[in-house]
Image: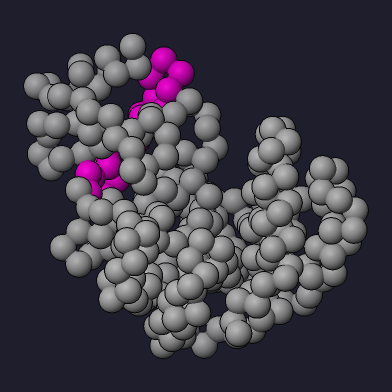
């Protein structure tokens, strides 16, 4: 079993499978000090290597679980990090806790600007992928209707300086745990070096799609806090372009998925074209 190596390496522990915000096969190692989890994936999974290198960059901060170890065994990669017994922040949005949601979006803005986007690629030797506005050959996504793809090309045809900072790639309350009023950002498999608007646009996109009734207020809280740490230019055209860029990246990953999945993301792409994220 893939868990045997953990039982051999860590004595007198009990393994409990976790979900609720974690990706991959994740186990709590009960009995260690401090408490840790093991995220297990196929060895050679590039996404997990990306997460490891991202956590190395952030290991000195208090915004991610601390990375303790990683090793391979019998074709699997094991990543050992602190267990954060917190609550997934999306729960507060689902439960319509407005005050808590605003505080979470304020902290998300602060953490993103102060702790994550402050890490520049030019100052780092960590190997992470470069995430550009257009990363793939758009014609390869032949399941997207031609008319819609032509609109995508128009939206992505903008001139912008590609400042290279650490980006999370799927930033938002769904990838944040809260414990004792502190937030911890998890699941860094989509991280890389890219423009700050990759993350900024995605958190706005997420709240507008899933929580339209409170999207304007939470977006305002997030942007006000983020911009208190940064002078970055933000406007509707840029938010739209980077939102579309992130969706295209997802659609590249689902090119072999079921028709239902592809159709859902085509619907979301069309919705993005028609949505005003800053109005």
Check the image and name the residue furthest to the top: 1
Residue 92, given in percent of the width and then of the height, sits at 31, 62
Residue 186, given in percent of the width and then of the height, sits at 37, 52
Looking at the rendered structure, the number of numbered marks drawn on it comes to: 0
Decide whether residue 8 is among the magenta residues. Answer: no
In the image, is residue 157 above or below residue 70?
below
Where residue 28 sits, quadrant-wise, is top left
Left or right for 73, reference 152: left
In depth, the one of 246 and 76 nearer the eye is 246
Residue 181, given in percent of the width and then of the height, sits at 20, 67
Residue at the (42%, 70%) spot, across then down: 112
Residue 7, given in percent of the width and then of the height, sits at 20, 18
In depth, the one of 119 and 148 nearer the eye is 148
Residue at the (25%, 54%) spot, across then down: 87
Left or right for 86, reference 143: left
Q: How is the image coloured?
A: one colour
Residue at the (86%, 51%) spot, across then down: 145
Where residue 257 sits, quadrant-wise, is top right
Is residue 60 visible to us here? Answer: no
Is residue 34 visible to us here? Answer: yes
Residue at the (65%, 77%) spot, across then down: 276
User: Which span is picked out in magenta?
Assistant: 66-84
Where residue 243 sits, quadrant-wise, is bottom right
In the image, is residue 236 above or below residue 108?
below
Magenta stretch, overall SS: strand
In the image, is residue 159 above or below residue 164?
below
Quarter of the image for the C terminus: give it.
Answer: bottom right
In depth, the one of 20 and 196 nearer the eye is 20
């Amino acid at each position: 079993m893939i868990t045997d190596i953990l039982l051999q390496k860590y004595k007198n522990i009990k393994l409990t499978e976790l979900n609720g915000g974690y990706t991959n096969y994740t186990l709590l190692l009960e009995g260690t000090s401090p408490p840790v989890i093991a995220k297990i994936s196929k060895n050679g999974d590039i996404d997990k290597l990306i997460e490891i290198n991202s956590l190395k960059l952030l290991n000195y901060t208090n915004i991610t679980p601390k990375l303790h170890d990683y090793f391979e065994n019998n074709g699997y990669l094991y990543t050992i990090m602190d267990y954060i017994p917190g609550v997934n922040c999306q729960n507060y949005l689902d439960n319509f806790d407005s005050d808590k949601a605003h505080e979470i979006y304020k902290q998300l803005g602060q953490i993103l600007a102060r702790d994550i986007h402050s890490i520049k690629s030019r100052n780092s030797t960590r190997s992470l992928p470069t995430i550009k506005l257009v990363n793939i050959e758009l014609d390869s996504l032949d399941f997207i209707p031609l008319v819609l793809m032509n609109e995508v090309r128009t939206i992505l045809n903008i001139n912008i300086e590609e400042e290279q900072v650490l980006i999370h790639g799927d930033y938002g309350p769904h990838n944040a745990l809260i414990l004792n009023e502190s937030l911890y950002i998890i699941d860094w498999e989509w991280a890389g070096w890219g423009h700050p608007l990759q993350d900024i646009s995605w958190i706005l996109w997420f709240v507008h799609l899933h929580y339209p009734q409170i999207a304007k207020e939470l977006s305002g809280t997030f942007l006000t806090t983020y911009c208190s740490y940064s002078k970055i230019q933000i406007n509707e055209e840029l938010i739209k372009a980077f939102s579309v860029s992130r969706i295209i990246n997802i659609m590249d990953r689902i090119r072999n998925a079921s028709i239902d999945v592809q159709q859902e993301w085509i619907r979301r792409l069309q919705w993005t074209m028609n949505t005003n994220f800053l109005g």
